[in-house]
Every structure is written in structure tokens, then in C-alpha cells.
Amino acid sequence: MSDQIFQGEVAIITGSGAGMGKEHALLLASRGAAVVVNDLAPSAQDVVDEIVAAGGKATLSKHDVSDPEQAKALVQTAIDTFGGLHIVVSNAAIIRNVRFIDMDYAGFDQVMKVNAYGAFNVLNAAWPHLVAQQYGRVVMVSSSSAWMSQPEIGHYAASKGAVLGLAKTLSAEGEEFGITVNVLAPGAFTQLAASLDDPEDKRKVMETMMHASLVAPVLAWLVRKENTLNGQIIETAAGRAALNFIGSTKGYWSKDLTVEDLIANGDKVLDQDGFAAIGSTAELAEWMTNTNTGWAEELSKA
């Protein structure tokens, strides 16, 4: 198999002037993709220059993804420069360290505009092109912070939760058009990660073991033509890739549910034995129907 697995394909990678985005751009370009390097940072030009010097194809986009009109211009740049668009990687993100009690609207709004609205703006502009050609490979970069998080990053966690929800919906809507949409939940030592207030010894381990270049192969794996995964969350850090999923326990059911029922049966609500991995609301409804036989019987009477 040729290593030029993305030959003839055009990719947009937002936030690719440094960190993980840069590594994504370098890897896809080295494997044949024409890459639109999108970032407001001056270092984005260096990424373009590095790709071109190595014999690859790249162009610079300094469009601000938080602005819907500039996001449209970003997509048009890919089409005008390289003649099409096949891969969209929504990677641009910012983070701020602040406890919720000290958080204000302006700070929350700034993070949401880049991380959540930025993802929406780019996909909203790219989606009609992908649908029209009946093909696309989309990866939306979320974070494990969306479902487990830590103190002082409430706005970041909220924004990444929005990205996760949007990606799940797009994966369902895009399937009939040959578009796959998956979620990447990466861990790497980048400028963004370095901005967190972690102990020095932890930072040294992260810098040594969690290089951003170890995330890029997972991204490339997800955006291949041959990829059939859709609507999945893939977590990766330090050379590890793994499926992350949402599960549902068997739970407790009563058609006349009361607080007293839950006090008496709370252990059944929380018991993880026999849980199911749930990928969609339809799967959840089927699981609930099949698991709670009493509910199934009631439904059959309706």
C-alpha cells in the first residue's frame, strides 16, 4: 500500500499553527493531502512553509472560525485553492483557568465562541459541499473534560460538551451521504495544556510521554477513505488509542415511580453489572424497552 493514502484529498485543519493541529497538518500533508492550515497565530505560516519545503501542498488561512462569515471564507479557500474539500478537522480551541465563582459572561462567551461556535461555523459552511459530493471525513476534537472534567475549566468543559453533542448529531445526519463524523478526545502536552496550573513534575512527565505527534496517527486513521467508524469517541494520549463510550445500567423501573422507590432501590439504579454501551437515542429506547420488561408490557398495551 502506498504511504500517500490521502493523495488527491483536501483537508481543512483549524487551529493548526501549533500543537496537535500542527502535527495533524504535517502528517496528512506528508501522506498526500493538500492542507489548509488555519490559525490566527504567526506560526501558522511556518507550518505551511515546512509542508511545502518537504514537497507537500499547503496554504495559509488566517480566518477567525468564531466568525461565521470568516468560516465560510475558510471553506471557500480550500475549494478555490485546491479544487475541493474532503476532510474537515475541527481542532481550534482556547482555555482559561478560572473557578466558576470568578467566571464572568465575557470569559465564558470568548471560550464558547472559539471552541463551540467555531466548530459549528466551520461545519455549517463545509456541510453543503460534503453532502453535495456524497462524501466527507470529519473529526471534531472534543475532550474528556466534557464528561469528567476538573476544577477551573468549566467554560472549556461546557464548550467541548457542545462539540460532542453536535458531532453525535452530525454523524447520524451524515451517514446517508457517505459522511463520517467522529470525536477525538486527545491528551498531549501543548501550549494549551502547558497553560494549566499543574505541578512541575507532572508537567515534565506530560512533556516527555504525551507528545502531540502521537495524536496525529489516530486522527489520520479516522479520516481515511476506508474508515467506516461513525459517531464514535476515540480517546488517545501517549501512544494509546481506545474507544470511549456512553453506557446505561439496567436501572430500576416502576410505572408508579416514587421517591420512596428510589430510596429503597437506589443500588439498582447505580449497579453497573450488565450495562450496555449506548450510541444513539434509538439504541437507548430499545435498551430500555428490552431491559425493563414491565415497561415493555405497558407499551404493548398502548
Image: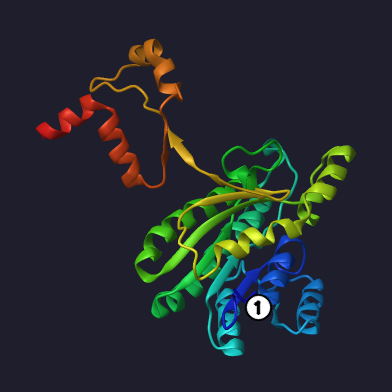
| Quadrant where the C terminus is found in the figure | top left
Q: Is residue 251 above or below residue 210?
A: above
Locate residue 264: give its quadrant.
top left
Question: Residue 76 lies in what quarter of the image?
Answer: bottom right
Residue in view at x 23 percent, y 26 percent: 293
Q: Nearer the viewer, residue 200 or 62?
A: 200
Furthest-front residue in this view = 1
- Residue 292 visible in the current orientation: yes
Taking 50 as reference, is 180 left or right?
left
List x then y, in percent, for residue 139: 55, 62
Q: Position of residue 89 (x, y in %)?
A: 59, 66
Q: Indicate how the structure is coloured in the image.
A: rainbow
Q: How far from the left and from the top, in percent, is residue 63?
A: 66, 76
Residue at left 49%, top 64%?
227
Judged from the image, the secondary structure of the residue bearing numbered disc 1 is: strand
Drawn side of residue 27 relative to residue 46, left or right: left
Of 30 and 170, nearer the camera is 30
Residue 202 shown left or right of residue 214 in the figure? right
Residue at 45% across / 79% down in the picture? 129
Q: Nearer the viewer, residue 169 or 105?
A: 169
* Residue 39 visible here: no
Q: Amino acid at mark 1?
A: Val
Residue on which the image places disc 1? 36
